Amino acid sequence: MQNELLLGFIVLYMLGTLAIGWWASRRVKTTADFVVAGKRLPLFMASCALFATWFGSETVMGASSEFAQHGLLGVIEDPFGAALCLLLAGLLIARPLYKLNLFTFSDFFRLRFNKAAEVTSAFFMVPSYFSWIAAQIVALSIILQAVFGLERAFGVLICTSLVLIYTYIGGMWSVTITDFVQTIAIIIGLVALTVDLVLQVGGFEQMAAVAPEGFLQFFPDPKATDIIAWFAAWMTIGLGSIPQQDVFQRVMAAKNERTAVWSCYASSVMYLTIAFLPLIICYCGRMLYPHLLEDDAQMMLPTMVLQHSGLGMQILFFGALLSAILSTCSGAMLAPATVVGENLVRPLYKDVTDAQLLRIMRLSVVGVAIVTGSMALMRSNIYELVGESSALSLVSLFTPLIAGLYWRGASATGAILSMIAGMAVWLLTVFILPEEPTDEQSVWWHIPPMLYGFAASIVGMVVGSWWRPERRVDAMGSITAMAERVNQ
């Protein structure tokens, strides 16, 4: 009976999500409404949208299981790196890019460099989302399988269709309004479960007293390999997700420049605090039910709630979990679809009306859903899927973006060479370097492949800009002057 009631709640929740998406779709009249919510979001809604960017399966299921097994050093990438990314987005990109009134990061590459840089960046940006979206779909299907015994293939189909429908009809308005509602559900559900479990284990003092040696260690041991791995973990999402389209769209949806900047700061604080709740919950579960770690660690939280809590707590937890995953998945699905429509399909036609562009972007959402749903059927490890996504954008897009914003000497040749060199070296080292190098091997074998790719992207930018310098930026002037040109 309890399972039937929980199933009924999940069905109602999903139907409610679709209803919100349909209601939000009435606000979509133009491409700007679909892509950046008409640039009308107040501070709190913009902050909730940014907070929900990554607060999904990776945080609730992936990072919490990593924390339960490896302590603080196991979760530097998320939530610490993710919170760093939101902070840096406010410091580095929100103010200059908001002035340009653009739809995508690739639009900036066209304006700052040239058409070739725009297309190259789009080709690298779009695939970086596929693993990320697939991870969210995998998480939803795993939950439906664990709770109701639903075959995984059907779970993938249901979850992909749900996110596709409300993202297709409402775009960023659907994403933003559902993010707002889902953030409230996340906070209520996770706070209630955290309080309940902390009281069960005897409070925070007891939790700290029984922690294994080194479990709460934040800084790495003074070994070169450990220090390198620690910095790499910070960089994966901390730097790698700065040039991602979902962050850009949520920042650009703010009602003004000041709101865009402060929503980044507010969401960074929200993420760092709220993302610690599933870590605390999982640690309490480790104390109360250590046998759950012996199976699939990323399913520890859902299994613990199902087996050791009442219906009310189950509803609160799964409401929070569904909210986290759906909010992340919808924004991630919209982001590459926007790039495909704006930077890859639109240039193929001469005079595209706004209505036609809106149709192109909606069809792009369908294409992204098909690709990522197919990936979700073939892969099952959430943490690995998420790591692949962030590393790809770090090695290809971060350097040309920051150089384009802050280095007047950066040229189009440098930007393109940076993207290609970073990606090529990353793929090469992934193939060459062992997954688990031994202690006897040189420190060079212990450096993560993405750091080699990141270094190659920097070298590519410097060499390319020296080899073929351009004076276009000097003619255009500063970012402020660029903004004036765009908005005339």
Image (spheres, rainbow, N blue to C red):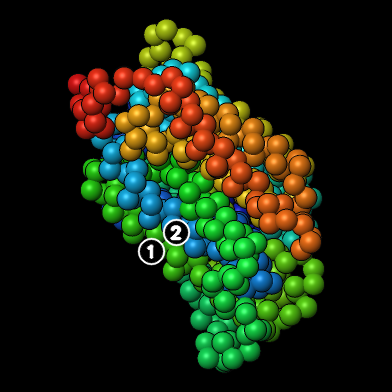
Which residue is identified by label 1?
269
Seen in the picture, residue 141 relative to 368 is either above or below; the reply is below
Q: Residue 192: x, y in percent?
A: 50, 76
Seen in the picture, residue 398 relative to 472 is either above or below; the reply is below
Which residue is identified by label 2?
83
Front residue (pair 33, 481): 481
Query: Badge 1, how many Cα within 10 Å: few under 14, some, many 20+?
Result: some
Is there any visible trace of residue 3 in the rendered image?
A: no
Front residue (pair 129, 218): 218
Q: Residue at x 68, y 37 (%)?
A: 427
Residue 228: name its quadrant.
bottom right
Q: Quadrant of the C terminus?
A: top left
Q: Residue at x 71, y 64 (%)?
A: 299
Q: Residue 81: x, y in percent?
A: 50, 58
Query: Badge 2, how many Cα within 10 Å: few under 14, some, many 20+?
Result: many
**Pointers 1 and 2 in contact (CB under 8 A)?**
yes
Q: Residue 124: x, y in percent?
A: 56, 31
Which residue type carries mark 1?
A: Val
Q: Residue at x 78, y 50 (%)?
A: 434
Disc 1 is placed on an element classified as helix
Q: Residue at x 44, y 50 (%)?
A: 178
Q: Earlier in the sequence, mark 1 or mark 2?
A: 2
